[in-house]
Amino acid sequence: MILAVGSLAAMGTALGALLGIASRYLAVEENPIELELAALLPGSQCGQCGYVGCAQAAKALAAHEAPVTLCPPGGKAVAEALAKKLGVTADLSEHEEHVPSIAYIDESLCLGCLRCAQECSVDAIVGAAKQMHTVIAEACHGCGKCEPVCNTMAITLKPIPKTVATWYWPKPGGSVH
Amino acid sequence: MRDLILLIVGAALVNNVVLARFLGLCSFMGVTTKIDTAVGMGMATTFVITVSSMGDWAIERFLLMPFDLGYLRTVTFILVIAAAVQFTEMVIRKVSPALFQTLGIYLPLITTNCAVLGVALLLVEGKMNFIQSTVFAFASSLGYSLVMAIFAGLRERIALADVPRLFAGPPVGFVTASLLAMAFMGFSGMSAN
């Protein structure tokens, strides 16, 4: 009885100590603010900020290496939320308010080169080589990544037409959050 | 040497942990949707099985057998396995954060993967010495990784196939698993000769 209890206790202590030592050497520096910042970003990994994805952008933000206005798809609302979280004042003087828009492909100009489809991070562009491409409106989040890669300027960002399904009450002035 | 080679082939192919002993089916169905994840899971489990079976062998030989504590076997083995899994988790988190994210919940669940405890109990049952048991554990887990990789490859192809709506998803996965298990039964003829 004593032997059983004692040996189990000894094993638990020894393994626990080993794990404790290992966790010292293998500790991963994880900044909790990074996770919170990543949650504020859109999370579509479009890469327009110049970082690989939203997690990397959040890391740069947490290290104060990037301005809070880095996220084009996020717009003013995300910049303000990020500024509030980081406790800095956002310089929004050069910010242009974009209306919600989606990519549109002018089919008479489309060559079927597939460049835009490869660029799209949400797979919103369908098409095959040498066939016209088109944009799936529900999937497109208007990041505008496809616009510069099009050689024939067939892609334009068009504002989403206001219909009963897409109209919302205007937000009250000032900060959204 | 010849015995060891026979042991390796027997543990990895003839008595494959997944397809012949039906251990570790949870992760076999769970993380085999992508081949990268399956290989990562196979490697993590290989490490855990090999390390924990070394520890389990030592515990069986120097603690449980001399003091006649056989009834503590399951508890102590699980203790060792849990510690090995925690260690593996730390290492993977440090070395490959991407793999850590894709494995997700299945990584701590290696603790309850019955293949890990199963291999340790088979070592005790087979009364193997240290080298035999380490080789047996490593070969068993290699067999596990092999089956995971094969099955993930199959499922990646099935994902593109036009499966009837009734069978789409997990059902066709189970059907494929059973066909794969039948193919592996072909190895059982090897032990007879």
Image (tube, rainbow, N blue to C red):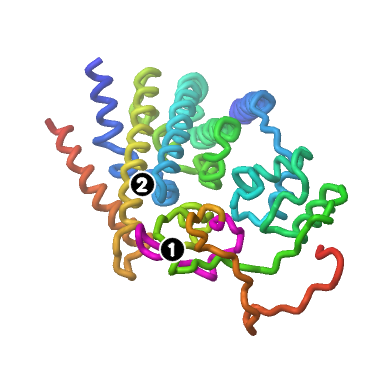
Q: Residues within 10 Å of mark 2 (few under 14, many from 20)?
A: many
Q: Residue at x 86, y 47 (%)?
A: A88
Q: Considering depth in this image, is A106 or B130 the residue closer to the camera?
A: A106
Examine the image and state in which quarter residue A93 appears: bottom right
Give x and y (percent) for residue A172.
Answer: 84, 73
Q: Name the residue under label 1.
A: A110
Q: In this view, does B156 lie to the left or right of A19?
A: left
Q: What element carries label 2?
A: helix
Give x and y (percent) for residue A110.
Answer: 43, 63
**In terms of secondary structure, what is the magenta stretch mainly?**
loop
Give x and y (percent) for residue B33.
Answer: 41, 51
Q: What residue type is labelled 1?
A: Cys
Using the rendered image, report if marks 2 and 1 lie on a common chain. no
Q: Considering depth in this image, is B66 or A145 the residue closer to the camera?
A: A145
Q: Which residue is drawn at 53% across and 68% down?
A: A104
Give x and y (percent) for residue B116.
Answer: 44, 36
Q: Which dot marks residue B157?
A: none
Q: Which amino acid does label 2 sit on?
A: Ala
Query: The disc numbered 1 marks a residue on which chain?
Result: A
Please say if B9 is above or below A30.
above
- Tell me if label 2 and label 1 are in contact, CB under 8 Å: no
Q: Quadrant of the C terminus of chain A?
A: bottom right
Is there any visible trace of residue B103 in the rendered image? yes
- Magenta range is A126-147
Give how far apart the Cα atoms at labels 2 and 1 are: 38 Å
Q: How crowded is mark 1: few (under 14 residues within 10 Å), some or many (20 or more)?
A: many
Is there any visible trace of residue B76 in the rendered image? no
Q: Mark 2 points at which residue?
A: B152
